[in-house]
Amino acid sequence: MQIQVDTHTHTLSSGHAYSTIIENSQAAAAKGLKMFCNTDHASLMPGAPHFWYFANQRVLPRFLNGVAVLRGVEANIVNTAGEVDLDKTVLAKLDWVIASLHEPVFKPTTRLDHTEALINTIKSGVVDAIGHPGNPNYDFDFEKVIRTAAEYNVLVEINNSSLGRSRVGSAPRCEDIAMIAKDVGARITTGSDAHFAADVGNFSSIQTLLGHVNFPQELITTQHPQTLLAFLTERGKLVEEQYQGHKW
């Protein structure tokens, strides 16, 4: 299974990651990636940058070390209304928006609350993907949320870090999520969630899981940059034109 895009990476700016965007791009190039997304944590995560950091990503080149760069964020879901911690005016400037539940920002409560928060985030129209949904601290109604994601054209992330040492207990839940996504036709994205450059483009556990459940390739948006760019075009984002004429 070929995956050419990493949609979830962090830099020093996240406060608890250890590489620069240049180092991440070098690692991406070495792994043979065609594209990666810069998705540092939004401002309510302890140690995260001011919102100016995200708005100012316009200064980033569209290619670093021969690898295409998408300007993004991993925003924090802050309440059951599905609000996130970055203003809509800033979100509108970004190519790629992940929204995730994080313990320092949204204290785990009940399955009902988590389900409501995720559904309202999906329905908000400002996020492109739900990050690391397998976290066992945030149980939710898998089928209800994933069906909503499919209906509103929001991607469900399969997160390589969750299948390793982060968010212990996520692996069987990620498998269930993948199975339901397959059954209801929800599209997915794949993120390394790298907090160090060496992990950029590490999809080994994702590939094992998707192979195990025989996940349909047509539902994987990260097999090729053009697939992800086409998805963003569907969502009304004019990112694809930034790469017109590039021979992938």
Image (spheres, grey):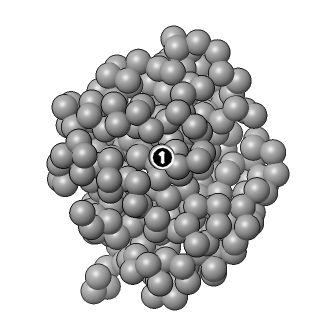
Measured from the top left, where is residue 152 in percent x and y? Answer: 33, 34
Task: Choose between 127 and 141: the one closer to the eye.
Answer: 141
* Relative side of 15 to 238, left or right: right
Q: For mark 1, what is the residue?
A: 163
Residue at 54% over, 28% down? 136
Q: How many labels were placed on the picture?
A: 1
Label 1 Cα crowd, 10 Å radius (few <14 / some 14-19 / many 20+): many
Residue at 55% over, 56% down? 193
Measured from the top left, where is residue 71 in percent x and y? Answer: 54, 65
* Relative side of 209 to 27, left or right: left
Residue found at the very far right of the displayed protein: 47
* Relative side of 53 to 228, left or right: right
Which quadrant is the N terminus positioned in?
bottom left
Residue at 51% over, 11% down? 112
Which quadrant is the C terminus positioned in?
bottom left
Measured from the top left, where is residue 69 in percent x and y? Answer: 49, 73
Query: Disc 1 marks which amino acid?
Result: Leu
Which corner quadrant of the image does residue 17 belong to? bottom right
- Element class at badge 1: helix
Using the image, determine if residue 158 lies above or below residue 103: below
Task: Choose between 63 and 175: the one closer to the eye.
Answer: 175
Evaluate whether residue 119 shows in this view: yes
Residue at 65% over, 21% down? 108
Using the image, determine if residue 30 lies above or below residue 199: below
* Relative side of 154 to 108, left or right: left
Using the image, determine if residue 116 lies above or below residue 10: above
Evaluate whether residue 149 shows in this view: no
Measured from the top left, where is residue 230 in percent x and y? Answer: 27, 60
